Amino acid sequence: MLINLVPEFLALINAPDSEAAYRSFHAAHRPLLDAYWRNYVLDPDSPPSVEVIHAALRADRRDLYALLDSIDLEQVAEEAIARAVDVLGIEPEAIVDTQWAANGPNWVVALLSSADAVLALEPGFVDFDLGVVGPYSGASPAAFEVRAFFPKDGRTAEDPVTGSLNGALAQWLVRTGRATLPYVASQGGALGRAGRVHLWEDEDGAVWVAGATATCVTGEVEL
């Protein structure tokens, strides 16, 4: 799935009342844009956001025009999907949907048909941040199984629990009607771990990520 908001954004900055146009744009794409602003530690509904958005609408946007002229975004998305298929060692038909999920790290995400399909993966070398998710069925306490792969020291590493990925996944899965909050995601099973990630939404629509922790080391550092 490719969601390209750049053309719509460029159109609104030339509107007679660009700030009113941006408010409508933000309301129409709130799940995506809220995540974008909060990634920059800014609540889009807070008073400080007014000036930040005002400045953003009046900034020089030749960079975005150049981007549209130089990059075929659909081709970029198709190449990302092909790379995911290749490193995961699966058929293209096994991927139900894909998404670019930016929540700090820039994850390429693949949705598979089931949690079992996710757990069965034996990926090759991954040279980008790749998240995979699949739903559980029946009475499982977890709604989804999640795995997170990334390159480290020339090899593929897997994270047992990944807050940034799960937060981005929740926004995508809810927006596409595949999940409702709150829910619990399982991660780390392929590594012999039993990670449980709890996701919920507050009254302002922000998605929160949490889970139990165990203190392994304590100490003090004098600086």
Image (cartoon, rainbow, N blue to C red):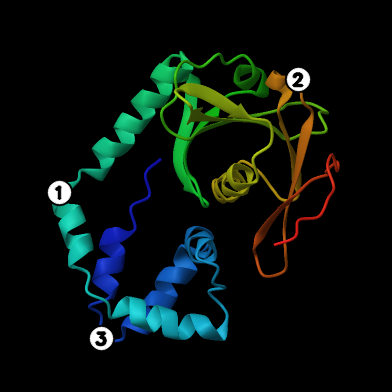
Name the side, left or right, on which 221 lies relative to 119.
right
Q: CA distance from mark 2 to mark 1?
A: 45 Å
Q: Is residue 112 visible?
A: yes
Q: CA distance from mark 3 to mark 2?
A: 58 Å
Most extreme residue toward the front is 222
Residue at the spot of label 1: 70
Residue at the spot of label 2: 192
Residue under the point 49% across and 58% down? 32
Residue under the point 51% across and 52% down? 104
Q: Position of residue 208 (x, y in %)?
A: 70, 56
For the residue pair 176 and 14, the one nearer the viewer reads as: 14
Name the side, left or right, on which 221 lies relative to 51.
right
Residue under the point 47% across and 15% down? 124
Residue 16 shows which numbered tag?
3
Q: Position of residue 191 (x, y in %)?
A: 70, 20
Give the amino acid type for the residue marked by disc 2 in the picture. Answer: Gly
Quadrant of the drawing holding the C terminus: bottom right
Q: Earlier in the sequence, mark 2 or mark 1?
A: 1
Q: Position of residue 67 (x, y in %)?
A: 20, 54
Give the amino acid type for the residue marked by disc 1 in the picture. Answer: Ser
User: Splitting the image into 4 quarters, where does residue 183 fall?
Assistant: top right
Q: Secondary structure at mark 1?
A: helix
Residue 26 lies, with reference to residue 99, above or below; the image says below
